[in-house]
Amino acid sequence: MIDFLSTYLVYIKTFFKSRAEYKTSFVLGMASNFYCYFITYMSYWVLTSGVNTVEGWDFSDLSILYGLSLITYSISGTLIWYSAYSLEDLIISGQLDIMLLRPQGLIRQMIFQRFGDTFLGQILVTVIFLCAAFAQRAERLSLPMVIYLVLAIVGGIFMQTGSMILFGSFSFWTMKSGALIDLLFYDLRGMTNYPLALYPRAIRIFLTFVLPWAFINYYPTLLITGKNITVYETVLGMIAPLVGVLWFLLAMAVFRTGLKRYTGAGG
């Protein structure tokens, strides 16, 4: 692990040196990404400005809810999103065959294939709004709560990264998984950008026990904001970081299973 981290830091340093040759393009890309997600945060502000709260959730609550989802997604995206999303292209083009001949593990190669610099704008805007939201709830930031927040973010990163790997792994069976990734990862995960209380019971169960996106942000936000919640919701919030790790392990198991059945670009 230490060897991987040191190598990855060298990789990032080298990446930014190369990007420094195209500073304008790099800055404009970050600014564009920042602007897109800034507008999303502003939509929450507009949503709550007239009624103050939506089902008991004010702007700072929604900022934390959306922020936990976005920052974990963005950090995961810098690591492996492009490679996981393009796994079908690696298979079809035969590039995966070349990667498998190398002495390094496939996941490690996928991480080093491309650094997701376009996600940096998302991380920046999320940090700003999360800091602003927590500044309004400074009384909640005790040491145990800060530790829980860190664990929730780490668990969310595991779940987001695991999901990218899991859905990308479907390419081993379907060859083309882009549309499925868009549906499962973007459309359904996007539903947790709003409180689950707004949805019917069937959807709440689905987003908790089938595709457990709610453990990334909804249940942690309930604990962090100190809402009046049930024992059931409290327990789900407490185990959210663990669920993220377990989901990642499941994703890796599916990935290895798909890799074992892979016979090469020619079938």
Image (cartoon, rainbow, N blue to C red):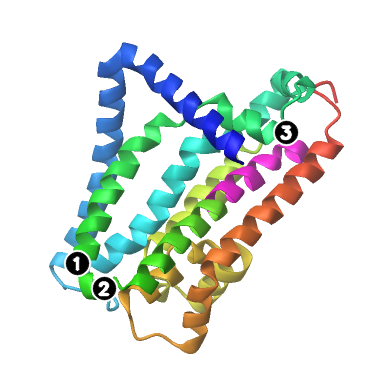
| Residue at which label 1 appears | 48
Viewer-proximal residue, 95 or 112? 112
Q: Badge 3: how crowded within 10 Å, few (<14), some, or many (20+)?
A: some
Residue 135: % across, % down: 19, 64
Which disc is residue 175 wearing? 3
Asked where in the image residue 134 lies, by quadrant, the reply is bottom left
Left or right: 44 with respect to 49?
right
Residue 149: % across, % down: 40, 64
Q: Is residue 202 above or below residue 243?
A: below
| Residue at which label 2 appears | 54
Q: Is residue 109 above or below residue 120?
A: above
> Residue at left 13%, top 68%?
50
Distance of mark 3 from mark 2, alpha carbons? 42 Å
Task: Please state which amino acid type lies under the numbered disc 3.
Answer: Met
> Residue at left 84%, top 21%?
266
Pointer 1 or 3: first along the chain = 1
Left or right: 112 with respect to 70?
right
> Residue at left 58%, top 32%?
111
Left or right: 88 with respect to 15?
right
Magenta region, residue range = 160-175
Task: Please state which amino acid type lies under the numbered disc 1.
Answer: Thr
Which disc is residue 86 wearing? none
